[in-house]
Image (spheres, rainbow, N blue to C red):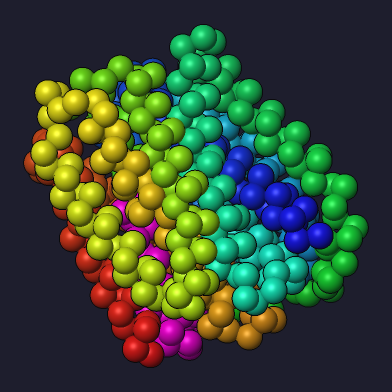
Amino acid sequence: MIWLVLIATTAAQALATLAMLAVPVIAPTIALAFGVDASLIGIQVSIVYGGAMLTSIIGGTLDRKWGAVRASQAALGIGSAGLLLAILPWLFTLALGSLLIGFAYGLTNPAAAHLLTRYTPAKRRNLIFSIKQSAVPLGGMIAGLVTPPLNEAFGWRIAFAILAASLIVLAVILQSGRKAWDNDREPHIKLHVNPFAGLSVTWQNKRVRWLSGCGFFYSAVQMCVASFLVTFLVHEIGFGLVEAGLVMALMQTGGVVGRPSWGWLADFMKNGHKVLLIIGVIAVLGSLACFFLTPETPPLLVKLVFITLGFTAIGWNGVYLAEVARSVPKEQVSIATGGTLFFTFMGVFFGPTLFSLAYGFTQNYTATFVGLGLVTLAGMAMVWKSKKS
């Protein structure tokens, strides 16, 4: 049973991530179509995660009321609608579609945490959560491999329509597991009773509170790297769009490998906090390496730098969510996950916009990428505080 649940939750998370990264991965093309600067993609990403913040804090309550499978189906349907809205030729519909994609993304993690906690033995929780969280870089890898070629072949609007259809197909497939996996739902729960219970649980638990601070800073770094990589490689390193998309896919592959690897290490060491600190150290070194990248840098070296960043800056989430689950009673896991993800998504909400502003000041993506190392150090400080709580 656990493997079917794992496959289902991983697939839902991967396609929600694919929808979320559809715009950033072909940002130069989208920017040209709307007549704006590609660096403004940070604002679009912030809109996505603003929506994710709103639904993450009520996600646990929705899971209990609807069932986690139904919440996942709703997320996929909303994400599909967001992609279709983005096709329309107006900036405000792109913004509205981005908001819907954010709503969808915010619903997926609490639902997955609810299901995985029910079916996963505690001793394997870091590994299983990390395998599921590999869906995020997996979705990014798919975005990097599929979206640019679809854009080249059919144009970005048809590419988005194809991606939207894939989300609907998965929503239909998930219906087969709804009866068995949603048998613990509580349909009579009132959403207005305490829709923000997750924030309360998160703030009252010191260990989770400091972990949420780590999530804020680590997620800001993760999304800045994912959102601006293609634009950085095209504008400053001289890569073509398809080649830059391939680097994006390789970086996300590093995350796909990294998440279960770090999860295994955390289970082996029986110390998720220490693993989060190790991840931070390597991510800082990867950020500093960006300072030395130029158009003359061998492409293989460029790829190695970003694979390393993918392995670390994108590889931390499973260990993080497993530590949150470990820090609260079992019946509060879904609610606490939604609460801590509010702060994680807040980091993503502010991170890309601040990255855009920093680029506007420096006019240099390389220097701005190096600055992400300082943000990672702040996240490491939060891990240390949580460990001491």
Q: Position of residue 360 (x, y in %)?
A: 15, 40
Q: Which residues are magenta?
A: 199-223
Vertical side of 155 occupied by 47: above or below:
below
Q: Residue at 34% across / 41% down in the picture?
A: 307
Find out whether residue 103 is within the magenta segment.
Answer: no
Q: Nearer the viewer, residue 275 or 213?
A: 275
Q: Residue at 14% across / 24% down in the picture?
A: 295
Q: Residue furthest top?
A: 153
Q: Nearer the viewer, residue 287 or 169?
A: 287
Going by the image, does 270 lie left or right of 186?
Answer: left
Q: Quadrant of the N terminus?
A: bottom right
Q: Nearer the viewer, residue 376 or 184?
A: 376
State the image quarter where residue 116 is shown.
bottom right
Q: Main secondary structure of the magenta part?
A: helix
Residue 260 in view, yes or no: yes
Q: Residue at 52% across / 75% down in the picture?
A: 324
Q: Position of residue 236 (x, y in %)?
A: 17, 27
